[in-house]
Amino acid sequence: MPRVILLLVIVFTLVVLVRRAQQQPPHKRRAAYLQIIVGSAVIGVVILTLMGKMHWVGAALTGLLVAARQMLPVLVRLLPALGSLRTSGARSSSKQSEVTSRIIKMTLDHDSGDLSGVVLESTFKGWLLSELNRQQLDELLSYCQHEDTDSAQLLASYLEQRFPEDAQDREETDRGGENGPAPSSRAEALAVLGLQDDATEEDIIAAHRALIQKCHPDRGGNDYLAAKINQAKDQLLG
């Protein structure tokens, strides 16, 4: 009887953990599933060892597995750092700008001009915009339009790039919004232009010139992003 109860508890726990993993953003699900698999394996080995059905070697392997699991986050943090040592000159050619609203954090790659982003609020909190399909993006846009106009304009700029064939359908939404508030701090303005804190006036002007060429509406860009870039430059240059 105790074994049956233990088995039911384990099954119930696994079901709860799997459901929680399914609710994670797609880019986090793999790690969540891996944690479940590792945890299940550890628990299974411990139970078999306590029941005397597994050699001490199994328990030792379990300890190594737990240690490896604890070290994994450290290795993940170190690997990018190790990679950056081999590509020390790449940082200057892969600058990014960040524009953050209440609901969305958007990133613009300076080299390719590609937009990417992450959702900060709503039922899709933590999701990458690239993970959302068209229906989900429309749902998010509707949420932004009701909750935060600034976020709606920011998402519209992403939709323009990802679905250029539908740009005309969103023209009314884009024109109806305001430019949004200017960056609230120097750090935020620098992030918009993709600059560091020690940026000079020449750096600011050069970054603004390069970005506005990619985002200016007359060149197929977006009014909202162009306005943000102009606001950042004005704030930094006083």
Image (spheres, rainbow, N blue to C red):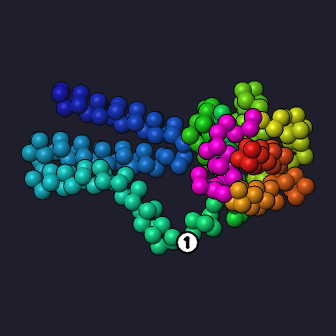
What kind of residue is marked 1? Gly
Instruction: Reply above or below: 162 against 12.
Output: below
Question: Majority secondary structure of the magenta segment?
Answer: loop
Quarter-of-image position of residue 176 = top right
Say which of 172 and 169 sits in front.
172
Instruction: Reply above or below: 65 against 10.
Output: below
User: According to the image, label 1 marks what residue?
Assistant: 89
Residue 201's x, y, as percent?
A: 71, 56
Residue 170's x, y, as percent?
A: 86, 41
Quarter-of-image position of residue 219 = bottom right
- Look at the image and tell me in which quarter the C terminus lies: top right
Residue at the location (77% across, 46% down)? 234
Q: Secondary structure at mark 1?
A: loop
Instruction: Reply above or below: 87 against 174.
Output: below
Q: How many marks?
A: 1
What span is colored magenta in the figure? 181-200
Residue 42's x, y, as percent?
A: 24, 46
Left/right of residue 196 with respect to residue 15 in the rendered view: right
Query: Does the segment drawn in magenta span residue 189?
Result: yes
Instruction: Reply above or below: 140 against 67.
Output: above
Say which of 76 and 6 sits in front.
76
Can residue 222 be seen in this snapshot? yes
Neighbor class of circle 1 (other Cα within 10 Å; few <14, some 14-19, many 20+) is few
Say which of 212 and 185 sits in front.
185
Query: Does the segment drawn in magenta span residue 142?
Result: no
Residue at the location (43% across, 39% down)? 18
Residue at the location (46% across, 35% down)? 19
Residue 36's x, y, as percent?
A: 36, 44
Can residue 152 be seen in this snapshot? no
- Look at the image and tell me in which quarter the N terminus lies: top left
